[in-house]
Image (spheres, helix red, strand yellow):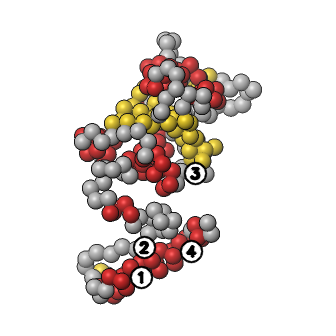
Amino acid sequence: MRIDIVTIFPEFFSVLDISLLGKARQAGIIEVVAHDLRAFTHDRHRTVDDTPYGGGAGMVMKPEPWGEAIDSIVGPGRSDAVLVVPSPAGEPFTQAVARELAAESHLVFACGRYEGIDQRVTDHYEGRMRVRLISLGDYVLNGGEVAVMAMIEAAGRLVPGVVGNPESLVEESHEDGLLEYPSYTKPSVWRDLEVPPVLLSGNHGAVAEWRREQQIERTRRVRPELLSD
Ligand SMILES: Nc1nc2cc(Br)ccc2s1
Protein backbone atom coordinates (compact mmCIF):
# COMPACT_ATOMS: atom_id res chain seq x y z
CA MET A 1 0.00 0.00 0.00
CA ARG A 2 1.14 3.51 -0.86
CA ILE A 3 0.05 6.38 1.39
CA ASP A 4 0.62 10.02 0.43
CA ILE A 5 -0.19 12.82 2.84
CA VAL A 6 -0.46 16.50 1.85
CA THR A 7 -0.10 18.87 4.80
CA ILE A 8 1.50 22.15 5.88
CA PHE A 9 3.11 20.15 8.73
CA PRO A 10 4.88 17.20 7.02
CA GLU A 11 7.19 16.75 10.02
CA PHE A 12 4.10 15.81 12.03
CA PHE A 13 4.14 12.38 10.35
CA SER A 14 7.77 11.49 11.07
CA VAL A 15 6.47 9.57 14.13
CA LEU A 16 5.14 6.93 11.72
CA ASP A 17 8.75 5.80 11.27
CA ILE A 18 8.81 4.56 14.89
CA SER A 19 5.54 2.74 15.59
CA LEU A 20 4.19 -0.57 14.32
CA LEU A 21 3.88 1.08 10.96
CA GLY A 22 7.63 1.72 11.06
CA LYS A 23 8.26 -2.02 10.71
CA ALA A 24 5.68 -2.24 7.93
CA ARG A 25 7.47 0.57 6.12
CA GLN A 26 10.87 -1.13 6.54
CA ALA A 27 9.36 -4.35 5.20
CA GLY A 28 8.00 -2.45 2.21
CA ILE A 29 4.42 -3.41 3.06
CA ILE A 30 3.34 0.22 3.48
CA GLU A 31 5.06 3.22 1.89
CA VAL A 32 4.22 6.58 3.48
CA VAL A 33 5.28 9.92 1.97
CA ALA A 34 4.34 13.31 3.47
CA HIS A 35 4.29 16.30 1.10
CA ASP A 36 4.57 19.95 2.16
CA LEU A 37 1.66 21.87 0.63
CA ARG A 38 3.77 25.03 0.69
CA ALA A 39 6.15 23.43 -1.80
CA PHE A 40 3.34 23.95 -4.33
CA THR A 41 3.04 27.71 -3.79
CA HIS A 42 4.89 30.25 -5.93
CA ASP A 43 4.74 33.50 -4.01
CA ARG A 44 7.33 34.89 -1.65
CA HIS A 45 5.15 34.20 1.41
CA ARG A 46 4.25 30.66 0.28
CA THR A 47 0.58 31.51 0.75
CA VAL A 48 -1.85 28.59 1.20
CA ASP A 49 -4.95 30.43 2.48
CA ASP A 50 -7.06 33.49 1.85
CA THR A 51 -10.25 35.18 3.10
CA PRO A 52 -13.56 33.40 2.42
CA TYR A 53 -15.88 34.58 -0.38
CA GLY A 54 -19.16 35.64 1.22
CA GLY A 55 -17.32 36.93 4.29
CA GLY A 56 -17.09 35.31 7.69
CA ALA A 57 -14.32 34.66 10.15
CA GLY A 58 -11.24 32.62 9.47
CA MET A 59 -9.39 31.71 6.32
CA VAL A 60 -9.95 29.12 3.59
CA MET A 61 -7.21 27.05 1.95
CA LYS A 62 -6.60 28.15 -1.64
CA PRO A 63 -7.34 25.58 -4.40
CA GLU A 64 -4.25 26.15 -6.57
CA PRO A 65 -1.60 24.65 -4.26
CA TRP A 66 -3.88 21.66 -3.59
CA GLY A 67 -4.38 21.02 -7.27
CA GLU A 68 -0.64 21.12 -7.96
CA ALA A 69 0.14 18.96 -4.93
CA ILE A 70 -2.43 16.24 -5.67
CA ASP A 71 -1.59 16.23 -9.39
CA SER A 72 2.09 15.74 -8.46
CA ILE A 73 1.02 12.55 -6.65
CA VAL A 74 -1.66 11.03 -8.93
CA GLY A 75 -0.63 12.59 -12.25
CA PRO A 76 -3.08 14.03 -14.79
CA GLY A 77 -6.39 12.34 -15.66
CA ARG A 78 -8.10 9.53 -13.78
CA SER A 79 -6.55 7.71 -10.83
CA ASP A 80 -7.31 4.53 -8.87
CA ALA A 81 -6.14 6.24 -5.69
CA VAL A 82 -8.67 7.33 -3.06
CA LEU A 83 -8.52 10.95 -1.91
CA VAL A 84 -9.35 10.91 1.81
CA VAL A 85 -10.23 14.27 3.35
CA PRO A 86 -10.76 14.39 7.13
CA SER A 87 -13.67 16.71 7.80
CA PRO A 88 -16.27 17.27 10.53
CA ALA A 89 -18.75 17.09 7.62
CA GLY A 90 -17.57 13.63 6.59
CA GLU A 91 -18.95 10.10 6.94
CA PRO A 92 -18.21 8.51 10.35
CA PHE A 93 -14.88 6.67 10.52
CA THR A 94 -15.62 3.12 11.69
CA GLN A 95 -13.77 -0.17 11.79
CA ALA A 96 -15.63 -1.10 8.59
CA VAL A 97 -14.31 2.07 6.89
CA ALA A 98 -10.82 1.24 8.20
CA ARG A 99 -11.12 -2.17 6.57
CA GLU A 100 -12.23 -0.55 3.31
CA LEU A 101 -9.24 1.79 3.32
CA ALA A 102 -6.90 -1.09 4.22
CA ALA A 103 -7.98 -2.87 1.04
CA GLU A 104 -6.92 0.04 -1.19
CA SER A 105 -3.55 0.14 -2.98
CA HIS A 106 -3.15 3.93 -2.88
CA LEU A 107 -4.50 6.45 -0.37
CA VAL A 108 -3.95 10.21 -0.65
CA PHE A 109 -4.79 12.08 2.57
CA ALA A 110 -5.48 15.84 2.38
CA CYS A 111 -4.97 17.59 5.71
CA GLY A 112 -7.02 20.77 5.82
CA ARG A 113 -6.35 23.62 8.22
CA TYR A 114 -8.06 26.92 9.04
CA GLU A 115 -11.76 26.81 7.98
CA GLY A 116 -11.07 24.02 5.51
CA ILE A 117 -10.15 23.59 1.85
CA ASP A 118 -11.84 25.44 -1.04
CA GLN A 119 -14.82 23.22 -2.03
CA ARG A 120 -13.71 23.17 -5.67
CA VAL A 121 -10.75 20.91 -4.80
CA THR A 122 -12.91 17.92 -3.87
CA ASP A 123 -15.43 18.86 -6.57
CA HIS A 124 -12.64 18.72 -9.17
CA TYR A 125 -11.13 15.44 -7.99
CA GLU A 126 -14.50 13.70 -7.77
CA GLY A 127 -14.33 13.73 -11.56
CA ARG A 128 -10.95 11.97 -11.55
CA MET A 129 -10.83 9.63 -8.55
CA ARG A 130 -12.80 8.39 -5.56
CA VAL A 131 -13.08 11.06 -2.87
CA ARG A 132 -14.12 10.31 0.73
CA LEU A 133 -14.76 12.97 3.38
CA ILE A 134 -14.36 11.17 6.71
CA SER A 135 -15.06 12.37 10.25
CA LEU A 136 -13.51 10.91 13.38
CA GLY A 137 -16.25 12.30 15.56
CA ASP A 138 -18.48 15.24 16.31
CA TYR A 139 -15.80 17.63 17.44
CA VAL A 140 -13.59 20.10 15.61
CA LEU A 141 -9.81 19.85 15.47
CA ASN A 142 -7.44 22.58 14.32
CA GLY A 143 -6.53 20.52 11.28
CA GLY A 144 -6.74 17.14 9.66
CA GLU A 145 -3.30 15.84 10.70
CA VAL A 146 -4.40 14.17 13.97
CA ALA A 147 -7.37 12.59 12.18
CA VAL A 148 -5.14 11.31 9.38
CA MET A 149 -2.71 9.80 11.90
CA ALA A 150 -5.57 7.90 13.52
CA MET A 151 -6.92 6.68 10.19
CA ILE A 152 -3.48 5.55 9.00
CA GLU A 153 -2.97 3.58 12.21
CA ALA A 154 -6.46 2.03 12.16
CA ALA A 155 -6.28 1.07 8.47
CA GLY A 156 -2.54 0.36 8.34
CA ARG A 157 -2.70 -2.27 11.08
CA LEU A 158 -5.31 -4.17 9.03
CA VAL A 159 -3.03 -4.45 6.00
CA PRO A 160 -1.86 -8.08 5.71
CA GLY A 161 1.62 -8.54 7.16
CA VAL A 162 1.60 -5.42 9.35
CA VAL A 163 0.42 -7.10 12.56
CA GLY A 164 2.43 -10.21 13.50
CA ASN A 165 -0.51 -12.36 14.53
CA PRO A 166 -3.60 -11.74 12.34
CA GLU A 167 -5.65 -13.67 14.93
CA SER A 168 -5.24 -10.69 17.27
CA LEU A 169 -7.24 -8.57 14.82
CA VAL A 170 -10.27 -10.80 15.00
CA GLU A 171 -11.38 -10.45 18.63
CA GLU A 172 -11.20 -6.69 18.84
CA SER A 173 -13.76 -4.10 19.64
CA HIS A 174 -16.06 -3.40 16.69
CA GLU A 175 -14.69 -6.24 14.55
CA ASP A 176 -17.87 -8.25 15.22
CA GLY A 177 -20.06 -5.21 15.87
CA LEU A 178 -19.62 -5.50 19.63
CA LEU A 179 -17.22 -4.01 22.15
CA GLU A 180 -14.44 -6.35 23.21
CA TYR A 181 -14.57 -8.43 26.38
CA PRO A 182 -12.40 -7.50 29.42
CA SER A 183 -8.89 -8.98 29.45
CA TYR A 184 -6.77 -10.25 32.36
CA THR A 185 -3.24 -11.58 32.87
CA LYS A 186 -1.02 -12.63 35.81
CA PRO A 187 -1.11 -12.27 38.77
CA SER A 188 -4.44 -14.03 39.46
CA VAL A 189 -5.01 -11.67 42.45
CA TRP A 190 -3.97 -8.00 42.39
CA ARG A 191 -4.86 -5.59 45.20
CA ASP A 192 -7.49 -8.09 46.40
CA LEU A 193 -9.03 -8.16 42.89
CA GLU A 194 -9.38 -11.66 41.47
CA VAL A 195 -9.43 -12.81 37.84
CA PRO A 196 -12.92 -14.20 36.99
CA PRO A 197 -12.66 -17.93 37.93
CA VAL A 198 -14.02 -19.12 34.55
CA LEU A 199 -10.82 -17.79 32.92
CA LEU A 200 -8.75 -20.09 35.17
CA SER A 201 -11.02 -23.11 34.58
CA GLY A 202 -9.37 -24.44 31.43
CA ASN A 203 -12.88 -24.91 30.03
CA HIS A 204 -12.53 -23.23 26.61
CA GLY A 205 -16.24 -23.49 25.84
CA ALA A 206 -17.16 -21.81 29.11
CA VAL A 207 -14.52 -19.14 28.53
CA ALA A 208 -15.88 -18.39 25.03
CA GLU A 209 -19.44 -18.19 26.38
CA TRP A 210 -18.41 -15.88 29.23
CA ARG A 211 -16.49 -13.61 26.86
CA ARG A 212 -19.48 -13.34 24.50
CA GLU A 213 -21.75 -12.50 27.43
CA GLN A 214 -19.28 -9.84 28.56
CA GLN A 215 -19.18 -8.33 25.05
CA ILE A 216 -22.97 -8.09 24.91
CA GLU A 217 -23.29 -6.75 28.45
CA ARG A 218 -20.55 -4.15 27.92
CA THR A 219 -21.99 -3.10 24.55
CA ARG A 220 -25.52 -2.81 25.99
CA ARG A 221 -24.18 -0.66 28.84
CA VAL A 222 -21.74 1.60 26.92
CA ARG A 223 -22.92 1.62 23.27
CA PRO A 224 -26.55 0.33 23.15
CA GLU A 225 -26.98 1.77 19.65
CA LEU A 226 -24.55 -0.86 18.32
CA LEU A 227 -27.03 -3.57 19.29
CA SER A 228 -29.96 -2.06 17.40
CA ASP A 229 -28.48 -2.46 13.86
N1 LIG B 1 -12.92 16.52 13.34
C1 LIG B 1 -12.19 17.28 12.46
N2 LIG B 1 -11.93 18.57 12.59
C2 LIG B 1 -11.18 19.08 11.53
C3 LIG B 1 -10.77 20.40 11.37
C4 LIG B 1 -10.04 20.72 10.24
BR1 LIG B 1 -9.48 22.52 10.02
C5 LIG B 1 -9.70 19.79 9.29
C6 LIG B 1 -10.11 18.48 9.45
C7 LIG B 1 -10.84 18.14 10.57
S1 LIG B 1 -11.49 16.61 11.03
For marks 4 and 1, give the one nearer the viewer: 1
Residue at 28% across / 75% down in the picture? 185
Decide: few, some or many residues near mark 1? Use Cα within 10 Å; few <14, some 14-19, many ≥20: some
Query: SS at mark 3?
Result: strand
Q: Amino acid at mark 3?
A: Pro
For the image shown, how many numbered marks are present on the structure? 4
Q: CA distance from mark 4 to mark 3?
A: 21 Å
Whole-percent x, y for residue 86 in the image: 54, 41
Classify mark 3 as within 8 Å of ligand 1 or not, answering yes or no: no
Q: CA distance from mark 4 to mark 1?
A: 15 Å
What residue would you read off at disc 1?
210
Q: In the picture provided, is 211 more to the left or to the right than 45?
A: left
Q: CA distance from mark 2 to mark 4?
A: 12 Å
Whole-percent x, y for residue 228 in the image: 62, 69
What residue would you read off at disc 4?
220
Give the numbered dot on residue 92. 3
Q: Amino acid at mark 2?
A: Tyr
Tag 3 or tag 1, which sits nearer the N-term?
A: 3
Q: CA distance from mark 2 to mark 3?
A: 24 Å
Q: Amino acid at mark 1?
A: Trp
Task: Name the quadrant containing residue 90.
Answer: top right
Q: In the figure, 44 relative to 141: above or below?
A: above
Residue at 31% across / 86% down in the picture? 203
Tag 1 or tag 2, which sits nearer the N-term?
A: 2
Tag 4 or tag 2, which sits nearer the N-term?
A: 2
